[in-house]
């Protein structure tokens, strides 16, 4: 069993209020999904891909490819027990309700409010102009270990497991459904460089292992 590590969700915006969530995260429970859509030939001979023989000919095997954004589900733990034992006033009174409110605020659409700040669209504080009333999704940074991933939060599923006498939750597991933002942004570019370096390290390790097996 891997020990939980600390993770963070940070809203990358000028928002009111600013949204930041710290949580415990067990890296053993992470499911990542990546899919592509291939464009192949329409004749019986090419429906499985065009012919090739040399490595330089592989670019013509498919006529096109569309990559879907990577998505994944993670399960995080929100627990105010230690803070309650330390006699923290907010934890004793509200448990993890502020953290759950933060998650709900992160997943709900925003509009441009006073001073250009992003606010919950449900508050009805958008300006009179059309662009100020249009709803947008929060851009979040998912931070854990060496990863800083730009994401959209697509779903939040809360399982409250312990409550105060006032029925306020102080412990819950939360399943988050997220989608990577794979446009031209510095966070995704750093992740792609890390991915390429990791693949190169694996190729080198595999080659050394294969050569060593020959002797």
Image: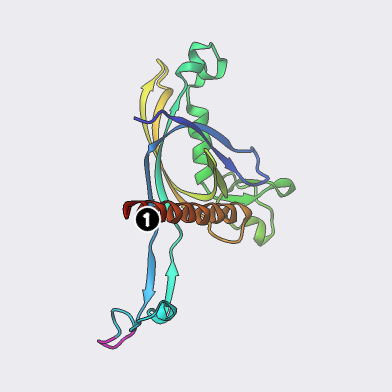
Query: Which residue is most to the right?
Result: 115
Relative to 125, 66 lies left or right: left
- For image coordinates 32% across by 55% down, the residue present is 214
The relative height of residue 188 versus residue 49 in the rendered view (above or below) is above
- For image coordinates 35% across by 55% down, the residue present is 210
User: Which of the 4 image quadrants contains residue 14?
Assistant: top right
- Residue 92, how many percent across, how many down? 50, 15
- Residue 204, how many percent across, how many down? 45, 54
Relative to 154, 110 lies left or right: right
| The stretch drawn in magenta includes residue 42 | yes
- Observer-nearest of 7 and 171: 7
For the record, the magenta segment spans: 41-45
- Observer-nearest of 77 and 114: 77
| The stretch drawn in magenta includes residue 66 | no
Quarter of the image that includes the N terminus:
top left
Helix, strand or loop for the magenta stretch, by majority: loop
Q: Secondary structure at mark 1?
A: helix
Relative to 204, 21 lies left or right: right
Query: Which residue is most to the front?
Result: 215
- Observer-nearest of 133 and 2: 2
- For image coordinates 35% across by 81% down, the residue present is 53
The relative height of residue 184 versus residue 208 in the rendered view (above or below) is below
Q: What residue sits right under mark 1 in the picture?
A: 211
Colour scheme employed for the rendering of this structure: rainbow
């Amino acid at each position: 069993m891997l020990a939980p590590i600390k993770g963070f969700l940070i809203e990358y915006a000028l928002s009111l209020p600013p949204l930041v969530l710290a949580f415990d995260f067990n890296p053993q429970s992470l499911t990542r999904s990546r899919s592509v859509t291939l464009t192949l030939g329409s004749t019986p001979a090419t429906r499985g891909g065009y012919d090739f023989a040399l490595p330089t000919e592989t670019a013509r095997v498919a006529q096109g490819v569309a990559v879907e954004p990577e998505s994944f589900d993670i399960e995080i733990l929100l627990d105010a027990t230690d803070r309650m034992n330390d006699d923290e006033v907010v934890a004793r009174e509200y448990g993890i309700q502020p953290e759950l409110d933060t998650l709900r605020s992160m997943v709900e659409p925003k509009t441009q409010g006073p001073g250009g700040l992003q606010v919950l669209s449900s508050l009805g504080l958008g300006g009179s102009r059309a662009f100020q009333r249009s709803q947008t999704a929060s851009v979040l940074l998912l931070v854990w270990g060496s990863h800083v991933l730009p994401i959209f939060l697509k779903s939040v599923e809360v399982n409250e497991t312990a409550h105060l006498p006032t029925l306020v939750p102080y412990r819950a597991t939360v399943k988050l459904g997220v989608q990577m933002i794979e446009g031209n942004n510095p966070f995704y570019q750093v992740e792609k460089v890390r991915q390429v370096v990791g693949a190169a390290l694996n190729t080198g390790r595999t080659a050394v292992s294969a050569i060593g097996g020959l002797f």
